[in-house]
Image (cartoon, helix red, strand yellow):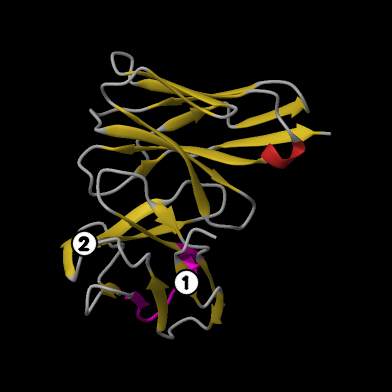
């Protein structure tokens, strides 16, 4: 257990539905990162926050993806109008920038 | 896009043997990190080596970095069945995000 938690751990949804995932980072960490991992591949960076500011979002896969970190603590990742290609593991990590990142267990999304 | 490429993609060894995995990357970096992932789970940080370092040790792990060749290697000595996992290298070039390779799937047979 790294101290980063993610909920839910598994999510099954139908195509076209919206889904939201939550990440609770290690409290002392000012940076929070979201990654996506498909089967057999390494994680792919999506976006990151420093405190409540989203400093990089150009890597979000489409405008259906959005993330928030309203008070600089927990973060949410929302996918609107899900597609089958969105099926993947969504990983959250926290850190202090320039050092190691601590990953949560991930949320596995299955879009039917 | 994936910056790092791990070699080999899969490795099978007997318990007690050493395992070596290699990673190549394309752009300049601040540091390079190695992570382990057990099947279907989150990633666990193993070791970080900064761009001005050439070698680092942690327990049974030894990492080398050659910035002139843009490559790194991870050596696991005296492997155990519990070392069975996927191993990823990840590069950090500005402290903003990690760029991962495709991973090496290691199987250690008891």
Chain letter for the residue marked with disc 1 in the picture: A
**A58 relative position to B54: left or right:** left
Residue under label 2 = A57
Residue A62 in percent (x, y) is at 28, 66
Instruction: Name the outermost residue toward the right.
Output: B110
Are there few (<14), some (14-19), or many (20+) residues within 10 Å of tag 1? many
Residue B107 in percent (x, y) is at 72, 35
Residue under label 1 = A6
Element type where label 1 sits in the image:
strand
Residue B63 in percent (x, y) is at 47, 24
Residues A65 and B44: in front is B44
Quote the CA–CA distance across marks 1 and 2: 20 Å
Is residue B54 located in the magenta-colored stretch of the structure? no
Which residue appears at 64% of the width and 52% of the height?
Answer: B39
Residues A36 and A82: in front is A36
Which residue appears at 35% of the width and 33% of the height?
Answer: B32
Q: Are marks 1 and 2 on the same chain?
A: yes
Element type where label 2 sits in the image:
loop
Q: Name the quadrant of the N terminus of chain A.
A: bottom right
Q: Is residue B57 above or below residue A84?
A: above
Instruction: Name the outermost residue toward the top.
Output: B68
Q: Is residue A36 above or below residue B91?
A: below
Q: Which residues are magenta?
A: A75-90
**B25 relative position to B93: left or right:** right
Residues B25 and B37: in front is B37
Lower position in the chain sequence, tag 1 or tag 2: 1
Which residue appears at 48% of the width and 81% of the height?
Answer: A15
Total marks shown come to: 2
């Amino acid at each position: 257990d790294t101290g980063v938690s993610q909920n839910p751990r598994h999510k099954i949804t139908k195509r076209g539905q919206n889904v939201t995932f939550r990440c609770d980072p290690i409290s002392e960490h000012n940076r929070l990162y979201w990654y996506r991992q498909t089967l057999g591949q390494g994680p792919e960076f999506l976006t990151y926050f420093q405190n409540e500011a989203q400093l990089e979002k150009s890597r979000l896969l489409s405008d259906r993806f959005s993330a928030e970190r309203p008070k600089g603590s927990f973060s949410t990742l929302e996918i609107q109008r899900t597609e089958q290609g969105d099926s993947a593991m969504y990983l959250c990590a926290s850190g202090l920038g320039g050092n190691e990142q601590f990953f949560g267990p991930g949320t596995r999304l299955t879009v039917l | 896009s994936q910056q790092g490429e791990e070699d080999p993609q899969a490795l099978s060894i007997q318990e007690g043997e050493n395992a070596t995995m290699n990673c190549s990357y394309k752009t300049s970096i601040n540091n390079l990190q190695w992570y382990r992932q057990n099947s279907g789970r989150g990633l666990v940080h193993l070791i970080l080596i900064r761009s001005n370092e050439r070698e680092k040790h942690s327990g049974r792990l030894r990492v080398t970095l050659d910035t002139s060749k843009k490559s790194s290697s991870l050596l696991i000595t005296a492997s155990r069945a519990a070392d069975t996992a996927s191993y990823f290298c990840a590069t950090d070039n500005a402290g903003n995000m990690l760029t991962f390779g495709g991973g090496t799937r290691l199987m250690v047979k008891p």
